[in-house]
Image (cartoon, rainbow, N blue to C red):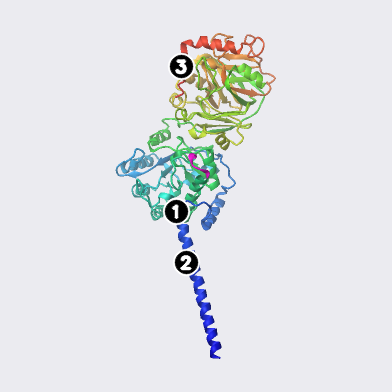
């Protein structure tokens, strides 16, 4: 009896001890897993994303309330906003400036005071996004204040000033530097929580390690930089991380797609400009603090917004019409209607021959090409160029990009025309153009803005965002959208400045117009006749070019035929390519330097 009870006791003790060992092992394993996960998340990039389930659920709830699901969105445009919004990009705020892009505490306080006195209304990043994506109303003079890099001065110096004025702002944080001193000390997670507790600060992503150029890292590292930073913010701060600022502003189509796939609603570059619909969702521009004065001048009505704002227009297809505007000192010949297409060659040809091969009844020489020497037959373009006739794409030459910033990048689709101020990230690949306008067929960089939203651009704005010779008198060529929503090609018979042309086009009711290659390249074609040549003498053929624009369609029944005294553009009886080369050589000898080296800034 005692033996049996003893055995039962020993058995019970063994079971209890075994249970204790199991629980102890499980607890140690769980603790080790938690500690290992914490290390894995914050000191070593994970190879498998998506680990914060509770915050992921919170993210879904927030997105559901916004009516937005980032997993089903694609890179593209935010098209519902009605107000342009300057986004200011700050870095550190310090008592004594250490690098040029920092601000002293005194400088930052003065800027905040100037904004307050100007009636500015700093907005949250959620208000910013809701306006551009859904048209939700904003107060007058909205502005978004952003800070990059998570430096301690943003907490100790900038935050008290923001609290004084009750100005909201965004802290874009590289999570690998949180609580770490590198060249500078950085905020801790506790300080970031304290900043958010003011109700003014929203913490968003600036990647994990702040790579200087996201376009040059591997797909695996790019995914981790995007996703680990997002999950770290969500884990530590308990709210979705929905927005991203690219380190150093470097991005391309692959980087934008990675941002979209990681679940960010939008991303910011360092491209110069105001954010306005149609806003490129993953290529949003920002301004440096020194541009605050420009912002204030715009609000006071003292200058136009520079660079000009993007615009998306629906195109109305119609039979082709032509006419001559004579409401000014100089006549302007124009052709409108049809659908627009372009061709880019690796050499040069006459616009008449190119139009005949395409089967277009209306054509015009295209945009600027790089090598303008008389004896050259090179076809390299200035800026990116996509052409549907022969399916070619030429990326921008990176060495040109700094001089081209802000010029009009024109994208065409069968139903829409999109114009955006050019930035280097738009010229690297055809995929970027497709992210901006998914059904894009043709694109090129025009020489400059002429008319914008129906108004002639002020001379100082044209000079800022156009080629340097825009006011040299010469025959002028342009492409635009008229008041009826039709494509328009046009040129002047006389040598005039772009400034004069802009006012003529405004009188014509043109809504948007952009400068094409002018001077000896000018060649406006209608029904295989040359309406306007780049030479003053009738019949002298224009310079051959590597790029041309065509209007495809039928002529309207009442469209006038070509004047009987105009020369043929192609075929028997027309000037040949050799004739055009000879004419260009003769006429251009006095202007050799201008042609030898184009001054595109």
Q: Do the CB atoms of the residues marked 1 and 3 lie less than 8 Å apart? A: no
Q: Is residue 217 rendered magenta in the image?
A: yes
Label 1 environment density (alpha carbons within 10 Å; few <14, some 14–19, many ≥20): some
Q: Which residue is mark 1?
A: 42
The CA span between labels 1 and 2 is 21 Å
Q: Check disc 2 and report its element: helix, strand or loop.
A: helix
Q: Earlier in the sequence, mark 2 or mark 3?
A: 2
The x, y position of residue 310, in whole percent, is: 52, 33
Q: Is residue 197 rendered magenta in the image?
A: no
* Front disc: 1 or 2: 2
Label 3 environment density (alpha carbons within 10 Å; few <14, some 14–19, many ≥20): few
Q: Main secondary structure of the magenta part?
A: helix
Q: Which residue is mark 2?
A: 28
* Front disc: 2 or 3: 2
Asked if one can make out residue 141 in the rendered structure from this viewpoint, the answer is no
Q: Residue furthest front?
A: 3
Q: Do the CB atoms of the residues marked 1 and 2 lie less than 8 Å apart? A: no
The x, y position of residue 154, in whole percent, is: 37, 47
Q: Which residue is mark 3?
A: 594
Specify the segment rendered in magenta: 215-219
């Amino acid at each position: 009896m005692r033996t049996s009870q003893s055995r039962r006791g020993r058995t019970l003790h063994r079971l209890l001890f075994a249970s204790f060992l199991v629980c102890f092992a499980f607890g140690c394993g769980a603790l080790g897993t938690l500690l290992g996960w914490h290390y894995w998340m914050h000191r070593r990039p994970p190879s498998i994303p998506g680990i914060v389930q509770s915050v992921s659920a919170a993210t879904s709830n927030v997105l559901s309330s916004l009516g937005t699901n980032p997993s089903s969105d694609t890179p593209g445009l935010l098209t519902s906003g009605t107000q342009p919004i300057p986004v200011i990009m700050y870095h550190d705020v310090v008592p004594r400036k250490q690098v040029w892009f920092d601000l002293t505490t005194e400088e930052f306080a003065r800027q905040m005071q100037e904004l307050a006195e100007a009636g500015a209304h700093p907005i949250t990043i959620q208000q910013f996004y809701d306006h551009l994506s859904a048209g939700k109303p904003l107060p007058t003079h909205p502005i978004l204040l952003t800070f990059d890099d998570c430096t301690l001065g943003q907490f100790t110096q900038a935050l008290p000033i923001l609290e004084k004025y009750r100005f909201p702002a965004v802290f874009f944080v590289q999570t690998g530097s949180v609580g770490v001193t590198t060249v500078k000390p950085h905020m801790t997670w506790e300080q970031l929580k304290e900043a958010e507790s003011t109700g003014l600060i929203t913490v968003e992503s600036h990647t994990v390690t702040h790579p200087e150029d996201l376009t040059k890292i591997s797909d695996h590292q790019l995914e981790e930089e995007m996703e680990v930073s997002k999950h770290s913010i969500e884990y530590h701060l308990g709210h979705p991380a929905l927005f991203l600022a690219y380190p150093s502003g470097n991005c391309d189509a692959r980087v934008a797609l990675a941002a979209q796939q990681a679940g960010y609603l939008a991303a910011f570059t360092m491209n110069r400009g105001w954010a306005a619909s149609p806003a490129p969702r993953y290529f949003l521009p920002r301004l440096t603090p020194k541009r605050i004065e420009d912002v204030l001048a715009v609000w006071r009505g003292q200058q136009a917004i520079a660079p000009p704002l993007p615009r998306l227009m629906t195109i109305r297809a119609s039979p082709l019409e032509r006419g001559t505007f004579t409401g000014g000192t100089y006549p302007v010949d124009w052709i409108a209607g049809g659908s627009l297409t372009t061709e880019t060659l690796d050499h040069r040809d006459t616009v008449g021959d190119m139009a005949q091969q395409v089967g277009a009844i209306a054509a015009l020489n295209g945009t600027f090409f790089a090598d303008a020497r008389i004896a050259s037959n090179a076809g390299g373009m200035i800026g990116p160029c996509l052409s549907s006739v022969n399916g070619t794409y030429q990326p921008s030459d990176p060495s040109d990009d700094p001089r081209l910033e802000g010029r009009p990048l024109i994208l065409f689709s069968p139903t829409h025309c999109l114009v955006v101020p050019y930035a280097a990230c738009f010229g690297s690949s055809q995929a970027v153009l497709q992210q901006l306008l998914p059904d894009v067929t043709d694109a090129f960089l025009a020489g400059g803005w002429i008319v914008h939203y129906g108004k002639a651009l002020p001379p100082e704005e044209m000079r800022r965002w156009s080629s340097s010779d825009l006011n040299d008198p010469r025959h002028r060529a342009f492409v635009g959208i008229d008041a009826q929503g039709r494509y328009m090609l046009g040129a002047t018979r006389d040598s005039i400045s772009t400034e004069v042309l802009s006012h003529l086009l405004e009188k014509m009711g043109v809504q948007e117009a952009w400068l094409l290659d002018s001077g000896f390249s000018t060649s406006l074609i209608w029904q295989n006749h040359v309406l306007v040549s780049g030479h003053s003498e009738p019949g002298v053929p224009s310079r051959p070019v590597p790029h041309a624009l065509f209007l495809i369609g039928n002529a309207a029944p009442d469209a006038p035929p070509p004047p009987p005294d105009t020369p043929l553009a192609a075929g028997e009886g027309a000037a040949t390519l050799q004739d055009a080369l000879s004419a260009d050589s003769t006429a251009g000898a006095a202007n050799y330097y201008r042609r030898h080296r184009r001054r595109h800034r």
